[in-house]
Image (tube, rainbow, N blue to C red):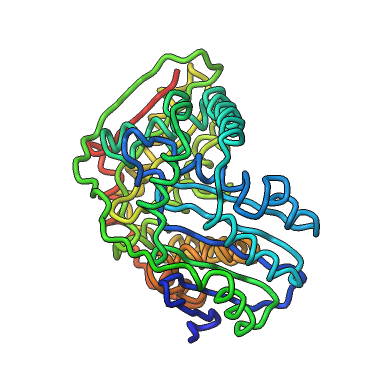
Amino acid sequence: MTNSSFKIHELQNGIRLIHKEVQSNLGHLGVLVNTGSRDEQEEEHGIAHFIEHSVFKGTQKRKAYHVLSRIEDVGGELNAYTTKEETAIFATFLHEYYERATDLLHDILFNSVFPEKELNLEKEVIMEEINSYKDSPSELIFDEFEELIFDGHPIARNILGTPERLKAFKRKDIFRFIKANYHTDQMVISSVGNIPFDKLVQLVEKYFGEELPRTRETKREKFDKYISGIKVENKDTFQAHCVMGNLGFDSLHPSRTALVLLNSLLGGHSMNSRLNLALRERKGIAYNVESNYTPYSDTGLFSVYFGTDKENLDKALSIVNKEFEKIKKNKLGPVQLLKAKKQLIGQLAISVENLEELMLTIGKSYLLYGKVDPMVKVFEKIEEITASQVLEVANIVLDEPQMSRLIFR
């Protein structure tokens, strides 16, 4: 079965495969699971990330060293990540090693044994990861801001967990979480590489096809109790750090694309974003300025971050608020709108030139939506955005009474 330039296949156990064949020396293969830190119970805080670290520590047929060496001995790379809503394990390798990679990813995902000794070592590694975050206020502030926005909800908790919870985890806790949250109908195998689709289907059926089907029957707890707030924390830092923002649209919301455009315009990757020009280029009072939009399955988050000298904090806040007011009151002119669209389209086109990034992107899209729009269709959706839609979205997301703020000073 095909989906534009992407080919898809579903195993009898519900695991889905999506593939894009490209002429490249490399293959990129990953397994994405619709499970993340928001699926943890309170006493499990941090376990999804802990599992992501620990799946490399040995399987029923490979010790930790052999897991890591299986791909890296032939020049490849093995990696993983955890977010609030997903876990991914993936590899990049010379394309002739597709079977090796398929076998290894299956072994890691379904046959990991989590040896107690290795778990204790990995706990120490994650402790250091937690400590490095605490030493980086410009990173820590984002986690604390989500705690402020989603107060009391599972999505509020940071991904890494706490040292206390981490120390308490046992092997049985890991197996319990996997049984409760790793379901075959919530898994997508994503591939971008130089291999015919029918051959890849054979490999996936060979290694993943024997797993018994496990269907998810529970639903995530929806977030619907947002109350805006302002919080200031005194920190021993050279700079003041500020994050301000509001709920954004969920991943299925019809205005999501307009918010993506607004985010790009305000503080996206480009040096000529409005906030970067206002704070850094014109005033020279900030080095890092950015805005971010993260859609989740049932909610979303829009935020703006900047760091500045403590003496310039009030001035910087005033400038940011003025930029918010401008974009809420003044509809974009035809030339401004066209430039914003072309910039966003160009950035997306560049991002998918990275084939590993493309593999993860199409895997996530297929996991969430059951389809992947070709880039031409994505560009068409951006082209269809009107100035009125951007204005409407700006007035919803940048509504001052609904904005929350967290400051480290």
Q: Is residue 25 left or right of residue 138?
A: right
| Quadrant of image for the C terminus | top left
- Disc count in the image? 0
Mark yes or no: residue 71 visible.
yes
Residue at image x 34%, y 63%?
A: 387
- On the image, the x and y values in percent for residue 116 come to 56, 35
Q: Is residue 328 left or right of residue 362?
A: left
- Depth check: 278 or 405 in front? 405
- On the image, the x and y values in percent for residue 245 come to 35, 39
- Depth check: 153 or 270 in front? 153
Residue at image x 55%, y 27%?
A: 127
Mark yes or no: residue 388 visible.
no
Write down the quadrant of residue 286 in the picture. Answer: top right
Q: Is residue 91 above or below residue 65?
A: below
Q: Is residue 227 above or below residue 32?
A: above
- On the image, the x and y values in percent for residue 265 come to 46, 53
Q: Is residue 77 above or below residue 373?
A: above
Residue at image x 35%, y 47%?
A: 39
Q: Residue furthest front?
A: 60
- On the image, the x and y values in percent for residue 45 come to 39, 35
Write down the quadrant of residue 262 in the picture. Answer: bottom left
Q: Is residue 4 left or right of residue 186?
A: right
Residue at image x 44%, y 39%?
A: 47
Q: Is residue 191 above or below residue 224?
A: below
- Depth check: 272 or 135 in front? 135
Write down the quadrant of residue 392 in the picture. Answer: bottom left
